[in-house]
Image (cartoon, rainbow, N blue to C red):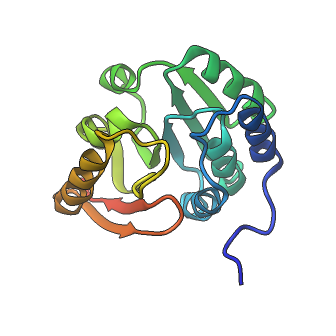
């Protein structure tokens, strides 16, 4: 039996088609997308953050699982990619795409805490998790992917991933589980006062 999702959300299919045409290889794969859809559904009315929106494939999966009262903020540093993501997600008023450096944005952010964060970018994931943790609500879910070897990795990347995998299990404010499936993930619950 296959673990691939039975259907792809229309916005995810649209974003993936744009990615395929442009040979953009960094989109969330369908199994990760389906998992995001399931996990974010546990946060009704949630304030959702995605760091590293890319062309919006993962964003579209998140939107598919969110209820009508939830809101998604997706951060993307590359202006052209972020602009395309905005176009893809424009039909859904629950989504906001911000073209910005994630660390800069998180440093100045003063809005409500986030109930769910999906981290799909390297610097925030590997080196600046503190900037995310400052904005997570107690009980928030923290999800990061791309933790298993991929063809696109350069020689410097595997040691960084291995360090992350070790460090994330030792984070005092997280209850984490590493999942060696799909692209490789960590799924963790944030405890603010741990």
Q: Position of residue 111 (x, y in %)?
A: 42, 29
Tell me residue 14's x, y (percent).
81, 39
Image mark count? 0
* Relative side of 144 to 74, left or right: left
Q: Is residue 1 above or below residue 120?
A: below
Screen quadrant of the C terminus: bottom left
Residue 95 sits in which quadrant?
top right
* Quarter holding residue 143: bottom left
In the picture shown, does residue 33 fall above or below 176? above
Query: Which image quadrant is residue 97 in?
Result: top right
Which residue does the image show at 55% across and 63% down from the upper left? 39
Q: Quadrant of the N terminus?
A: bottom right
Looking at the picture, how far across and down is residue 64, in whole percent? 72, 53
Q: Is residue 84 left or right of residue 10?
A: left
Asked if one can make out residue 194 in the rendered structure from this viewpoint, the answer is: no
- Tell me if residue 10 comes above or below residue 101 in the rendering: below
Q: Percent position (x, y) of residue 16?
A: 74, 41
**Residue at position x 61%, y 61% from top?**
41
Query: Which residue is rendered at x = 25% and y = 51% of the image?
Result: 164
Residue 85 shows up from this direction:
yes
Q: Residue furthest bottom?
A: 1
Nearest the viewer among 142 and 29 is 29
Which of these two is toward me, 108 or 99?
99
């Amino acid at each position: 039996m296959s673990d691939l999702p039975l259907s792809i959300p229309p916005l995810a299919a649209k974003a993936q088609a744009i990615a395929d045409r442009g040979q953009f290889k960094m989109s969330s794969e369908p199994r990760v997308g389906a998992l995001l859809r399931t996990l974010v559904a546990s946060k009704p009315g949630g304030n959702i953050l995605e760091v590293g929106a890319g062309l919006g494939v993962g964003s579209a999966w998140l939107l598919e699982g969110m209820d009508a009262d939830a809101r998604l903020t997706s951060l993307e540093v590359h202006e052209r990619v972020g602009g395309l993501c905005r176009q893809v997600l424009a039909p859904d008023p629950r989504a906001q795409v911000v073209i910005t450096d994630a660390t800069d944005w998180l440093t100045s952010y003063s809005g409500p805490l986030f109930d769910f964060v999906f981290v799909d970018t390297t610097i925030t994931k590997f080196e600046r998790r503190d900037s995310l943790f400052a904005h997570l609500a107690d009980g928030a879910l923290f999800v990061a992917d791309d933790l298993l070897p991929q063809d696109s990795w350069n020689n410097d990347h595997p040691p960084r991933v291995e360090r992350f995998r070790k460090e994330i299990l030792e984070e005092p404010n997280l209850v984490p589980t590493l999942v060696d499936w799909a692209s490789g993930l960590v799924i963790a619950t944030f405890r603010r006062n741990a």
